[in-house]
Amino acid sequence: MLTDVSRFQRLGADVVVWPMAKVCFPERIWVGDHVIVDDFVLVLPGPSSIIGSYVHIASFCSITGGGDFFMEDFSALSAGCRLVTGSDDFTGPSLTNPSVPAEFKNVTRSFVRLGRHALLGTNVVVLPGVTIGEGATVGANSLVTRDLEPWTVNVGTPARPVRARPRDQILRLERDLLAEYGPIPAAPGIPSPQEAQHDAA
């Protein structure tokens, strides 16, 4: 079944959602301009999620867990990334998996947030409640278990910073692009991590 793009909360200009992508509950997602969602992507959002402008979600990515996700302008997911916005409790005295009735489970719904210019390499996994700071990048096959500082290059399991990213040059290129191609729409207010955690509870 194809994603019904007419049902998005907002769908900006120059947006491509490839036919084999599966976006559940598109009415919960605000989408900016110049966005590409490749084939074989699965998105299961929480009550309110945002995809900014100039965003790419590559093939075989999944955004699941029933919590919100926020991808700010110029952010991207390389092939095979997994953003987990909520999870069963795998350590406590409860049953797990979606086939079990809710009263027997202990599920936490949270969020994942990618700041502007944040990029995740192939097969990166991000756990619930994590903010990837503005301009931060994560190397292929890394596991992100905690917030990452802005403008850092991060690798490993768990991901850790290894060097700085060239903030000034990237922001200059953004200004040049916007000067040539025009402004992009302002996304609705993205909640702070504390607000997002509270809303998901």
Image (cartoon, rainbow, N blue to C red):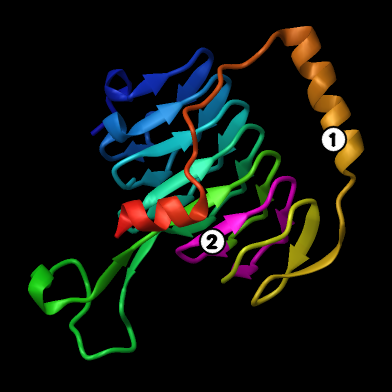
Which residue is located at x 80 percent, y 59 percent?
153
Q: Is residue 171 left or right of residue 15?
A: right
Q: Position of residue 143 (x, y in %)?
A: 60, 70
Q: Position of residue 118 (x, y in %)?
A: 68, 46
Look at the image and say whether residue 138 sits in the magenta stretch.
Answer: yes
Q: Is residue 96 left or right of residue 189?
A: left
Q: Amino acid at mark 2?
A: Val
- The image shows a total of numbered marks equal to 2
Q: Amino acid at mark 1?
A: Ile
The residue where tag 2 is placed is 130
The boundaries of the magenta stretch are: 125-144
Q: Is residue 84 left or right of residue 27?
A: right
Q: Which residue is more in the foreground, 20 or 162? A: 162
The residue where tag 1 is placed is 170
Look at the image and say whether residue 7 sits in the magenta stretch.
Answer: no
Q: Determine which quarter of the picture holds residue 132.
A: bottom right
Q: Position of residue 66 (x, y in %)?
A: 30, 54
Is residue 172 visible in this depiction of the protein? yes
In space, the residues marked 1 and 2 are separated at their CA atoms by 23 Å
Q: Of the numbered discs in the image, which one, if any, rests on residue 43?
A: none
